């Protein structure tokens, strides 16, 4: 089976590199975007990711807007992409908001180790 591609959208440089390395150890191909605009630009490239891991607090275009643009895309491959939110925003209103926008999961960074994040994403892509 071909390796799955992940678009990791994370503006924290240390955490982004750490998660990228963990995913790559599990044989995923990972593109790292550090801003909302960077994430949107990555989605226009091929090959497209199989899943997006999206932070909500990003410079410029925030994760809520990135998710909205993904879901409203005229390209059905982009619009239907599985998205997992990985954020420190843990309020029920934030979680409800993105779940209504069709995310596959909502992970709170502070509650999980990078290995646990990779494990949860791996199960989604299995």
Image (spheres, rainbow, N blue to C red):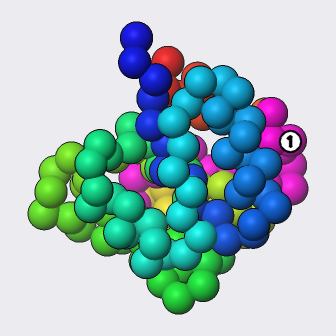
Mark 1 Cα within 10 Å, few/some/many (few <14, many 20+)? few
Q: Secondary structure at mark 1?
A: loop
Q: Is residue 14 something one can see in this rendering?
A: yes
- Furthest residue in direction left, as rendered: 74
Q: Position of residue 51 (x, y in %)?
A: 44, 42
Identify which residue, 33 or 69, lies in the foreground. 33
Instruction: Left or right? Give the position of 36 relative to 45.
Output: right
Q: Which residue is mark 1?
A: 113
- Is residue 111 part of the magenta span, yes or no? yes
Q: Is residue 118 above or below residue 103?
A: above
Q: Which residues are magenta?
A: 101-115
Q: Is residue 104 something one can see in this rendering?
A: no
Instruction: Left or right? Give the position of 112 relative to 64.
Output: right
**What residue do we see at 40% from left, 52% from top?**
102
- Furthest residue in direction top, as rendered: 1
Identify which residue, 118 or 67, lies in the foreground. 118
Q: Is residue 109 above or below residue 50?
A: below
**What residue do we see at 72% from left, 40% from top?**
21
Identify which residue, 33 or 77, lies in the foreground. 33
Based on the displayed image, in which of its 4 quarters is residue 47 positioned?
top left
Q: Is residue 117 above or below residue 70?
A: above
Instruction: Indicate the quadrant containing the N terminus: top left, top right, bottom left or bottom right.
Output: top left
**What residue do we see at 86% from left, 41% from top?**
113
Instruction: Tally the numbered discs.
Output: 1
Q: Is residue 98 above or below residue 18?
A: below
Based on the displayed image, in which of its 4 quarters is residue 54 positioned?
bottom right
Q: Position of residue 118 (x, y in %)?
A: 69, 34
**What residue do we see at 65% from left, 76% from top?**
57
């Amino acid at each position: 089976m071909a390796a799955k591609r992940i678009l990791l959208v994370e503006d924290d440089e240390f955490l982004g590199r750490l998660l990228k390395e963990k995913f790559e150890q599990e044989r995923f191909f990972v593109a790292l975007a550090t801003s909302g605009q960077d994430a949107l630009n990555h989605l226009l490239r091929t090959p497209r990711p199989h899943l997006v891991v999206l932070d909500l607090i990003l410079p410029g275009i925030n994760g809520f807007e990135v998710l909205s643009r993904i879901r409203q895309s005229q390209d059905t491959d982009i619009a239907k992409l599985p998205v997992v939110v990985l954020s420190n925003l843990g309020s029920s209103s934030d979680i409800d908001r993105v779940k209504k926008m069709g995310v596959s999961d909502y992970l709170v960074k502070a509650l999980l180790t990078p290995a646990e994040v990779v494990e949860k994403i791996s199960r989604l892509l299995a």
